[in-house]
Amino acid sequence: MGALDGFALARGSNVMGENMSADNRNYVLDISIDLFRLTTESLRLHSNETRQYQTLANLVNCRAETKNCGEEHRPDTLRKHFHAIPTDGDIHISLDILKTSAESLDQTREHLCRKLGSDMTVGDALSVLLFDYVAERKAAEVLDRMGLGEFNQNGDDKHSGQSREGNVLPFK
């Protein structure tokens, strides 16, 4: 592998493999340990949410079709995120996602470039997508615990995941 190939891998190259369909894109990324931990936390949350084992590709495909990530975050919040969770590192991953998801990630990357005034990679866009997801899920958990979650607002306690009786310890 030449020097330019290593640079392309670290920056998030788009590689077509032999088994790749025209409807998919494969990204090969070298990510940091912190971003790796964000991916595993995201997968844990998504698997628990769907009650099925999930892959990073499934999560990206699911999230990429629903929203443009990073739009609601202020530039200083995004800079703090990238400072806390750097993108580039020495953990090698391959991400095989739908072509439409790849296009959404690229739109997110372009949006981040404009918003932050600096070059961004597909890996950076992935990081923001996962940051968005984890923040959304954690906020939903807090709201559920407070009785203000999505299901509780509709008066449906069955889906909150916890009964209120189990959260209360009686005084004796």
Image (spheres, grey):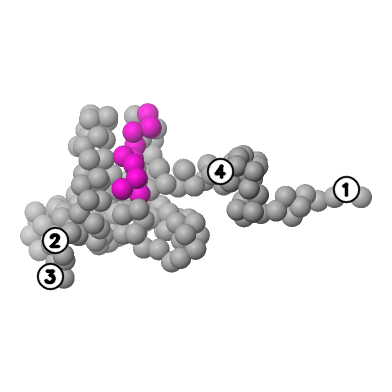
Comparing 45 with 118, the one in front is 45
Which residue in the protein does label 4 denote? 150
Is residue 33 visible in the rendered structure shown here? no
- Could you tell which of marks 3 and 1 lies nearer the N-terminus? 3
Disc 4 secondary structure class: helix
* Distance from the alpha carbon under mark 3 to that under mark 4: 44 Å
- Could you tell which of marks 1 and 4 lies nearer the N-terminus? 4
* Distance from the alpha carbon under mark 1 to that under mark 2: 63 Å
* Distance from the alpha carbon under mark 1 to that under mark 4: 30 Å
Disc 1 secondary structure class: loop
Is residue 117 visible in the rendered structure shown here? yes
Which residue in the protein does label 2 denote? 22
Q: Is residue 21 above or below residue 106?
A: below
Amino acid type assigned to the residue bearing label 3 in the image: Glu
- Could you tell which of marks 2 and 4 lies nearer the N-terminus? 2
Q: Main secondary structure of the magenta part?
A: loop
Which residue in the protein does label 3 denote? 18
Query: Which range is magenta?
Result: 63-74
Q: Which tag is nearer the camera, tag 1 or tag 2?
A: 2
Magenta stretch containing residue 4, yes or no?
A: no
The residue under the point 13% across, 61% down is 22
Disc 2 secondary structure class: loop
Q: Which tag is nearer the camera, tag 3 or tag 4?
A: 4
Which residue in the protein does label 1 denote? 171
- Could you tell which of marks 1 and 2 lies nearer the N-terminus? 2
The residue under the point 21% across, 44% down is 106
* Distance from the alpha carbon under mark 3 to that under mark 1: 66 Å
